[in-house]
């Protein structure tokens, strides 16, 4: 992969104040989706679910741990994974065996225990990749497979952007406009921190709209500070240890099949964005191990599963600052914020419409990276073989909006649309004749 023009690979050249702003930008990008997971799980467990404070601490710690495992080379941020939501709901609904008459607060540690096992399954795949060799492994994941998967990652998030933006289109358009104007016409630092500026300026507008008596499209208040008002200024995250039971393990652990496929797609997206082949160096086995261990560590402490975040990949593409130190700063901010619940709730009061307006660009950027990955690797779409593979991946990734649910030992397991797309793409690439792709050979085209 060629080095990107006008890219910044060492953010320290910008100075500490600007690096801190870049770190804040990454934190704002991940914040909305990251805290949404514990909010949803809390609903499943009737108020006794995951803590936002613990979640922020665990995603920050998990990100730092991931960077350690990947030799501090990959500019990724690990946020809360949505893939396990169905598993949490299933465990909350269990009412047999040891779960008979068990309270929701008692069930949750067992759900987290299943996530721990799912995290350790990453190590199994990492070991296979290490033993088989990355070149042989990536023969099954050429650009004709990874490119459409990356496109699906961005497009599958598109409905979320529309849903959030539709809450208040004026606010969403302001956030969108600020990001576009700063990124296209901005100079110097304005061009590098468009997301942060979009959040701040649109939030100021939200305050003005709120004071003027305006409401969202559904009649709800634009801003709600009730949670921030009731939260304490300083508070230690309420950690607790997970527990293990075969039933919850069978519910949660198989979900790792889906998330590992998603990880490979995210890893490819980050590599294509930055212009460095992280699948080769530090290696797919290291990124898998880092993601899996971060997930296991988070669940052990009562946090959610972690996953590399597409929102932050979008920030990389938009800012062209690829220094891994910047996401690490965002991780440190998340850890510090976990000890200040009032500040966390205040940031959490950011209107959904602002998130939607910014997501218009971030999610689209991810898909654009997938298109670029296909173009730069000169995938030959005059070949029927490649057309079929790409077509099936796109239809699966966008068509299975609710995933695919099947039963294993009496337990329902759901594969996400992205996981189905990845499995279908890998399988077709292995079955159909004509795969002439050679890993890391930029002159070789897919047949």
Image (tube, rainbow, N blue to C red):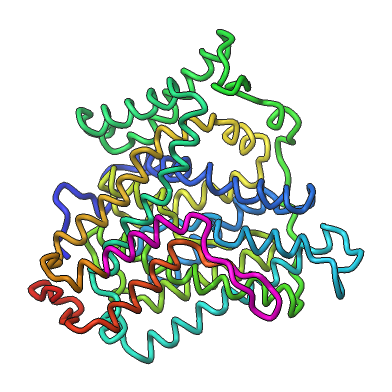
Q: Where is residue 97 in the image (x, y as percent from the top left)?
A: 86, 75
Q: Kindly identify the residue that appears in the image at 74 percent across and 80 percent down.
A: 246
Q: Which residue lies furthest to the left in this view?
A: 443
How many numbered marks, from 0 up? 0
Figure check: 210 above or below 419: above
Q: Is 269 inside the magenta-drawn segment? A: no
**In the picture provided, is 324 more to the left or to the right than 94?**
left
**In the picture provided, is 257 more to the left or to the right than 318?**
right
Q: Kindly identify the residue that appears in the image at 89 percent across and 68 percent down.
A: 100
Camera-nearest residue between 192 and 171 = 171
**In the picture provided, is 382 more to the left or to the right than 74?**
left
Q: Which image quadrant for residue 23?
A: top left
Q: Residue furthest bottom?
A: 131
Q: Is 400 inside the magenta-drawn segment? A: yes
- Screen quadrant of the C terminus: bottom left
Magenta stretch in the rendered image: 389-413
Q: Is residue 272 shown to the viewer in this render?
A: yes
Q: Position of residue 1 (x, y in %)?
A: 17, 65
Figure check: 443 above or below 434: above
Camera-nearest residue between 338 and 112 = 112
Figure check: 336 above or below 80: above
Q: Position of residue 215 (x, y in %)?
A: 57, 17
Q: Which residue lies furthest to the top in this view?
A: 212
Q: Where is residue 136 in the image (x, y as percent from the top left)?
A: 28, 87
Q: Kindly identify the residue that appears in the image at 19 percent across and 61 percent down.
A: 374
Q: Is residue 273 shown to the viewer in this render?
A: no
Camera-nearest residue between 39 and 389 = 389
Q: Kindly identify the residue that appears in the image at 20 percent across and 74 percent down.
A: 385
Figure check: 401 above or below 267: above
**In the picture provided, is 18 more to the left or to the right than 97?**
left
């Amino acid at each position: 992969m060629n080095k990107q023009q006008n890219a910044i690979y060492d953010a320290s050249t910008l100075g500490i104040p600007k690096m801190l702003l870049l770190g804040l930008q990454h934190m704002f990008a991940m914040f909305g989706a990251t805290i949404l997971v514990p909010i949803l799980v809390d609903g499943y467990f009737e108020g006794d679910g995951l803590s936002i404070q613990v979640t922020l601490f665990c995603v920050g710690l998990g990100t730092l741990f991931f960077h350690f495992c990947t030799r501090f080379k990959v500019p990724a941020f690990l946020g809360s994974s949505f893939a396990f939501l169905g598993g949490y709901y299933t465990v909350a609904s269990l009412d047999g065996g040891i779960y008979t008459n068990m309270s929701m607060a008692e069930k949750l540690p067992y759900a987290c225990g299943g996530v721990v096992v799912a995290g350790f399954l990453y190590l199994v795949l990492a070991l296979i990749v290490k033993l088989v060799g990355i070149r042989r492994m990536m023969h099954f994941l050429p650009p004709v497979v990874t490119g459409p998967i990356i496109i699906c990652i961005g497009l599958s998030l598109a409905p979320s952007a529309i849903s959030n933006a539709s809450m208040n289109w004026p606010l969403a358009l302001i956030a969108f406009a600020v990001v576009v104007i700063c990124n296209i016409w901005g100079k110097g630092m304005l061009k590098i921190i468009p997301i942060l500026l979009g959040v701040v300026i649109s939030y100021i507008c939200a305050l003005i709209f709120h004071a003027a008596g305006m409401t969202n499209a559904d009649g709800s208040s634009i801003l709600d500070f009730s949670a921030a008002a009731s939260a304490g200024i300083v508070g230690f995250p309420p950690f607790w240890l997970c527990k293990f039971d075969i039933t919850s393990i069978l519910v949660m652990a198989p979900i790792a099949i889906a998330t590992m496929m998603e990880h490979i797609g995210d890893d490819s997206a980050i590599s294509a964005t930055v212009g460095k082949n992280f699948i080769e160096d530090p290696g797919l086995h290291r990124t898998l191990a880092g993601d899996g261990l971060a997930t296991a560590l988070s669940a052990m402490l009562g946090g959610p599963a972690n996953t590399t975040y597409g929102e932050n990949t979008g920030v990389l593409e938009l800012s062209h600052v690829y220094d891994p130190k910047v996401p690490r700063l965002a991780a440190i901010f998340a850890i510090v914020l976990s000890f200040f619940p009032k500040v966390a709730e205040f940031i959490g009061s950011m209107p959904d419409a602002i998130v939607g307006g910014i997501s218009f660009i971030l999610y689209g950027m991810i898909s654009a990276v997938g298109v670029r990955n296909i173009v730069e690797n000169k995938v030959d779409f005059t070949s029927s073989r490649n057309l079929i593979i790409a077509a099936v991946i796109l239809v699966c990734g966008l068509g299975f909006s609710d995933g695919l649910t099947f039963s294993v030992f009496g337990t329902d397991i759901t594969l996400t649309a992205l996981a189905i797309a990845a499995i279908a793409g890998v399988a077709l690439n292995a079955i159909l004749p004509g795969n002439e792709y050679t890993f890391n050979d930029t002159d070789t085209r897919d047949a």
